[in-house]
Amino acid sequence: TFPLTLTLLTLNLSFPFSILSWKNCPKMSKLKDMKTILLTLLLSVGLFAQNERLNDRFAFLQQIYFENTHGRYDRYLESSLEAFLQKHPHFDQADQIILMLGDVQLNSQKPYSAFIQYIKTPTLYPKSDIVPNAKKKLNQLLKKIRNVSFLEKKDSILNYVNQKHYFDSPEEATVDLYNFLFSLNIPKLRRPLLADLNRFTRSCRSLNQQGDVILYLKGRLNEALGNFLAAEANFRELMALYKKSLFYPDALFYTAFIDYKHLKKFEEAKNDFVQIINTYPDNENAPRAQFYLADLYANGLDSLNAGIDNYRLFVDAFPEHPLFKSAFKRLTLLLFKTKRYEEAVTLIGLHLNKHAQDSTFYSLVDSMAQIFTKRFKKYEYAARCYVLLASTNPHATKSPYYLYQAARIYRKFLKDYGRAADICLRLKKNYPESPYSVKCQLLIKKRVKK
């Protein structure tokens, strides 16, 4: 009865003033004041009745939850609890509903959905009386889940749960939690996280401050789940509504990437990649935009020379990027494909000097030499690559092997026995203990016997 009593008290306090003022007021003014008073009274009674119904609804769901010992009401409870949270996200006992929902989802063999609910209580309702119970359930679940990628993030999860969180609003706290869960990069968590995000956005009247984050997370999750049209729509909505967002360049990149790789919208992708490179050169996705622009030219737009130019820009600008070796390999292959053989070998020699301490780069050049031999039949360039490998880092373990391969190509494919003999002598002189020195001598003896 508290809302109704408060309203009546307010009305009683206002009546003397109203009576004094009505003596000198027109009849229309008196009528309007009376309507306002009645409307206020009706609204208060309506709110009181609505709260009563909400409490009754919660009590009913709680009763069904306690009766659900054999899981017969799992499906009904899950949909009803989710609908309640979506419609009444600020209900006084929302923490209990969330915990109940987690239990139902766990009982329904949905451990990752349950995990999301269990982690909400201690992070979104840190003062709740049921936090210890929620943490206990969370720890039990973490021990139960055997997923490797999940177990690797266990310490990060517990640290997030146990630290103190300070936010201006429940929505801000929820968005931060979603961002943390996404950052864990656990594949099994993607689908239930996306479902929870969708319910959360449907429950919010406004997300002006955090809407770009939500759209970005939805886009990334939809992309990872193969929902490419939905992902593109998420990113495009972000760019349309939040033009000054910090996520704008990233949304632009992922839109271009999806358009190129999955939707075959090559011209749109090309324009977006160029915009990222020119407008946001310091963004972390600018190098990737350069890489995929080159790939798009070479494979989507069938412009090999443009592909070569753009791969060369990437190789020159981003020698430490994780995509460098892929770009280098593709550039070299394109040079061979366009019969620019000398450029390809010069490029290899130049970058061998730059990456003299990178053993994986040597393995890459080795594989390129094999491609030159088997695919392009350009034996001289393959042999030159092996000589470059041995010469750039003569102390490397594989240098004797590289010299032997060069001698073998000169003898077997190019019939240049003199060049093969010179390389074998160099191998014997510099690496007398290497088994490849013996193999090289046998290679020369075969020529003598003939």
Image: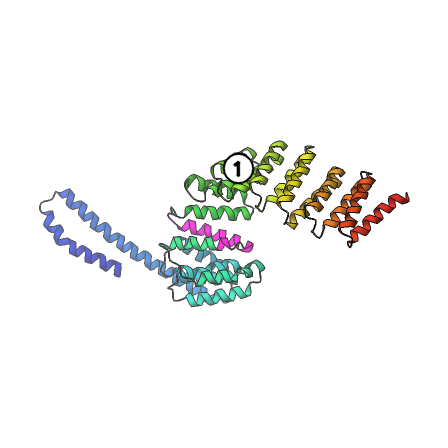
User: How many numbered discs?
Assistant: 1
The residue closer to the viewer here, 446 or 270, is: 446
Q: Amino acid at mark 1?
A: Phe
Relative horizontal placement of residue 120, taking residue 152 as reference (left or right): left
Residue lying at the far right of the rendered structure: 449
- In x, y percent, where is residue 298? 62, 35
Categorize mark 1 by other alpha carbons within 10 Å: few (<14), some (14-19), many (20+).
many
- In x, y percent, where is residue 28? 15, 42
Image: magenta residue range: 181-206
Relative horizontal placement of residue 426, taking residue 151 as reference (left or right): right
For disc 1, the marked residue is: 273
Asked if residue 198 is among those painted magenta in the image, a careful observer would answer yes
Label 1 secondary element: helix
- In x, y percent, where is residue 36? 21, 48
- Residue drawn at x 26%, y 54% is 44
Asked if residue 233 is among those painted magenta in the image, a careful observer would answer no
- In x, y percent, where is residue 165? 40, 59
Which quarter shows the N terminus?
bottom left
Residue 209 appears in the picture as rendered: yes
The residue closer to the viewer here, 261 or 1, is: 261
The residue closer to the viewer here, 256 or 412, is: 412
Tell me which corner region of the image, top left, top right, bottom left or bottom right, holds residue 372.
top right
Q: Is residue 124 above or below residue 217?
A: below
Dominant secondary structure (helix, strand or loop) of the stretch shown in magenta = helix
Q: Is residue 57 above or below residue 352?
A: below
